[in-house]
Amino acid sequence: MATIHLSKGGFLRRVANFEQSPNEWKFLGDKPALIDFYASWCAPCKALSPIIDELANEYNGKVDIYKVNVDDEPELSSIFNIRSVPTLVFIPMNNAPQIATGTFPKKELSQAINDILLK
């Protein structure tokens, strides 16, 4: 499965409805998620993109992998206080999201998915 590009509407339906629950994190997904906050002009984001796409295929059915363009969705970026790109948000089923900024090798990202999302 390919990565899913999220707009605000998709985020509200698939990840968290911050309009209904502005003071509380309520994850809506049926499996853990990884969100790649990126910008089309960002060279590190472009380098990370094919890795994210590969991971989406490898973890298909186990982890939902989303992409959010920070220029198109500034409100979503502000929810996680995104200040630089790329920023990855790991969302486990029953814990608070964890944030990592920068690019990472595929092996390291796979390990993070296994350790944070699939334990």
Image (spheres, rainbow, N blue to C red):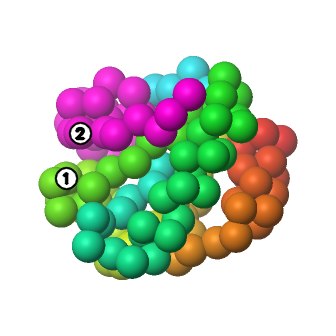
Q: Residues within 10 Å of mark 2 (few under 14, many from 20)?
A: some
Camera-side residue: 26 or 105? 105
**Circle 1 SS class:** loop
Q: At 18% across and 62% down in the image, what residue appears?
A: 71
Q: Position of residue 43 (x, y in %)?
A: 39, 77
What label sits on residue 7 in the rendered view? 2
Q: Between marks 1 and 2, how big is the CA–CA gap?
A: 7 Å
Can residue 81 be seen here? no
Camera-side residue: 5 or 93? 5
Give above or below for 52 relative to 27: below
Give above or below for 88 relative to 114: below
Secondary structure mostly seen in the magenta stretch:
loop
Q: Quadrant of residue 51?
A: bottom right
Q: Position of residue 46 (x, y in %)?
A: 42, 67
Residue 117 included in the magenta stretch of the image: no
Mark 1 is on which residue type? Glu
Q: Earlier in the sequence, mark 1 or mark 2?
A: 2
Mark 2 is on which residue type? Ser
78 left or right, relative to 102:
left
**Circle 2 SS class:** loop
Quarter of the image with the N terminus is top right
Quarter of the image with the C terminus is top right
Instruction: Read off the magenta span.
Output: 1-27
Q: At 33% across and 51% down in the image, what residue appears?
A: 68
For mark 1, what is the residue? 73
Can residue 119 be seen here? yes
